[in-house]
Every structure is written in structure tokens, then in C-alpha cells.
Amino acid sequence: MTYALRKEGEFGILFNMEKISLNQSAEQKVLKGINLIEKGDLPDNNLDNIWVEFQGSRGQFLAKGYLSAQNKGAGWVITRQQEELDLAFFVTLFQMAWNKRQAYHESKLITAYRIFNQDGDGFGGLTIDFYDGYSVFSWYNEFIYSQRAVIIEAFQKALPQIKGGYEKIRFKGLDYESQHLFGQEAPETFTVLENGVCYQVFLNDGLMTGIFLDQHEVRGSLVDGLAAGQSVLNLFSYTAAFSVAAAMGGAAETTSVDLAKRSRELSQAHFEANHLELDHHRFVVMDVFDYFKYAKRHDLSYDVIILDPPSFARNKKKTFSVAKDYHNLIAQSLEILNPNGILIASTNAANLTISKFKEQIEKGFGSQAHNYVQTYRLPADFQINKKDESSNYLKVFTIGI
Ligand code: SAH
């Protein structure tokens, strides 16, 4: 089923702007350059899904933005100027975002990357990814979703070279999560390039696409030979993109572990896209915590272990949160890591600061000697709000023992 783009007039909210007074601490936050508004910043009136003008504690103009409850936060500051948030505003926004990524457009080694990233590109609640000519819009709240007719119109005006678009719904309340939006339809699956390596992607099958684009540089380090000649264990592997990168960089063998059954076929597709033989590459459908036990029982150990868990997971027996339990993953990995081995520890939890993440890692290492070799944060296509540390959510350390 197709859900039509509704016209802006139907909502009546495009020109309707409520004034909202922020308390003093929220005012300070906005003045500091933070754009994400939280529930506690707002007066107790049930306004939601509406453009707003934020006012300071003395009633002065602070910023324009909108309110809409989302997974993280209750609204966004969009501009600190008295400008209209209309079609022309979005056209300029998309052109500027596109121009910032010139190096990516010109590179022959990469055809999938982010072309609009939340408030790093001037509008929180929206991301747009580029997959070899097609675009994928992610709407993070109901308000931005309600504005999508004008947003898509502006996008097509700004970037007519984009062949077609898909959308992903990243808030609760609708009965679909993915659909084709405009222009040409992409093939059901096709390959994109990154660091010269092929990955098989799909743009209209649930929220995921077969690859997490924010890990370009970490995969790049593997393609460049970080694990050359080594055995690699990739935990929480999803489609085994890290394993493919390692194999292309000369890894002797890889093992990819994920509990989702579908991960095996999707992982194989990435390997096949690069004509890699599967003899030395294993795909295991298993809970990572069971795999630690399995590996110890079978005396398996590895030269490089990659840890990239979801921020939060729950299964029948237990819950896992990176903020509280990451140390446990490190400690268990160390038991099956070879001497002179390397751990790649990654998290995308925005609510975990880099220093808190490091504390978890240190707790996992205990008294065991180790050294931090490399740190990765979001790559340049994932523009961040430099005033808001939480917008640079990706944290990856390469650690040697
Ligand atoms: N590292 C991946 C992305 C990981 S996404 C990449 O680079 O593409 C998180 C993955 O963890 C999901 O595929 C999910 O199925 C898997 N997962 C969650 N809990 C798990 C567990 N306890 N054991 C194994 N896999 C798990």
C-alpha cells in the first residue's frame, strides 16, 4: 500500500506558530547551541506536533523550531534567526548539505553515504542517506513526517539528480515502517561501494538496509589491512560488513556471530558481491553470550575481536545495556583473544559519553595491560552539531594488548 504525501494546507500547521517560554536552564542550553529540546525544558502544556517560537525567561525571542515527541527528546531548535521555515528554506538547506559532501560525490570508491544528518545539517529529526543515486529519508517524529510533502518538494528542487526516494518511519504510531516515496524505484537488492568494497543493500525491507553507513572509517581500517593474515571474530555482526572489510584487507579467516537467523544469508551476499570464497568465513547464528562459552569449550581464540552491540537488548533471560554491561563483553572477549591481539570496541549509544564508555572498557580490562591505538567518531558525511557532544554518538576504539 502507498501512503500518499498529503499537502501542507491539510495540516494547517505550516503557518501556525505557537510561542513557548523556556525556563532559565533550557534558555542557557539553547544559547549554548544545543538544539535538542527535552520534555523537562518545556512548560507543562500539552503542545505537541507544532512549529514554535522559543522565548527566553524575559519573553525575548530565542529561536524557531518545533515540538514533537520522539524516541530521544521532545522537539528541536531549527534556527536562531527570524527566518521563514518554508519551501525556500528547505531548498537551501538541502543544497548546502549536498555541497558539504563534494569529496564523497567525486570519489569513485564510495557510492553510499549520508547526505543530510539531523541538526548537524540544520534540521533535527531528519536524516537522508544516499545509495548510488537513490535517497532514503528517515523521519524521527510525527511532526517532521507531517511536513514531508514540502520537504520532498524542496529536496527534488534542490537535487534533481537523485533518481528516487524511500522513507523509513522511526517513531511509533504508523502501521508501516518503509515505503517507496518518489521517482524511480531501486532494484530490490543492489550493490554499493565503500573503500572500493561491494556491499549488497536493499532500500525497502524494514528499517535496515544491509549496512550501517556510519562505520565507513572503521571498515576502512580493516580494508587497509588492520587484520591482514589474522583470525577475526565479529560479534553482533548483522550482515557481517566488518568481516567482509577484514577479508578484503587480507584477514586469514573470519567468524561472524549474530542471533538473527537472516544474518547468515545477508552476510553471504556481501561476501559473494566481492567474489570471496566462503571456505575461511563462518557465519554463526547464536547469542553472543552463548558463543563466548562455546568458544571456550572448543578452545577457540582470535587475533582480532570486533564488538558492536545494540545499545540495549532484551531476551528471555536477561537485558543488556552498553551503559552498564559493556565491561562484561570486554572481559569475556579477553578470555578468547590471542596474545598481541586487537579489540575493536564500538558503541552508537548517544546517551553514553566517551568518558563513560572508556570507564566501561577499563572496568573490563581490569589490571590487564592494553593500549589505545585509534579512536573513531562519526565520519564527515555524518555532520554533527559541534556544540552538542551527544550528536557525535559513534565511539569506536581500537585497543591492542
Ligand atoms: N556490527 C553490525 C551492526 C550490529 S546491529 C554492523 O557493522 O553492521 C546489532 C546486531 O546485534 C543485530 O543484528 C542483532 O540481531 C544483534 N544482536 C542483538 N543481541 C544479540 C545477542 N545477544 N547475540 C547476538 N547478536 C545479537
Image: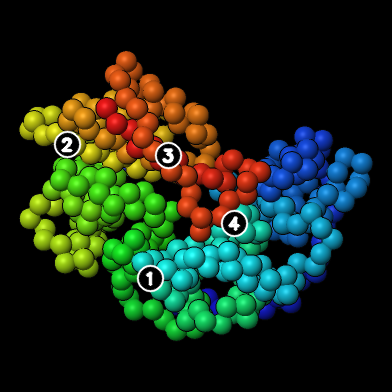
User: Alpha carbon of mark 4 to alpha carbon of mark 3: how far?
Assistant: 23 Å
Asked if residue 204 can be seen in this view, the reply is no
Query: Is 365 placed left or right of 78 in the picture?
Result: left
Query: Is 218 placed left or right of 144 in the picture?
Result: left
Q: Position of residue 78 (x, y in %)?
A: 72, 57
Q: Nearer the viewer, mark 2 or mark 1?
A: 1
Looking at the picture, does residue 249 appear above or below residue 349?
below
Quadrant of the frame with the C terminus: top left
* Closest to the observer, 5 or 174: 5
**Residue 375: mark in rendering:** 3
Q: Nearer the viewer, mark 2 or mark 4?
A: 2
Q: Kindly identify the amino acid type of the residue bearing the numbered disc 4.
A: Gln
Mark 3 residue element? strand
**Residue 364: mark in rendering:** none
* Closest to the observer, 316 or 396: 396
Dot 4 alpha-carbon crowd within 10 angstroms: few under 14, some 14 to 19, many 20 or more: many
Q: Earlier in the sequence, mark 4 or mark 3?
A: 4
Circles 2 and 1 in contact, beta carbons < 8 Å: no
Q: Earlier in the sequence, mark 2 or mark 1?
A: 1
Q: Earlier in the sequence, mark 2 or mark 3?
A: 2
Name the residue that disc number 2 marks.
302
**Residue 118: mark in rendering:** 4
Q: Kindly identify the amino acid type of the residue bearing the numbered disc 1.
A: Lys
Mark 2 residue element? strand
Q: Residue furthest top?
A: 367
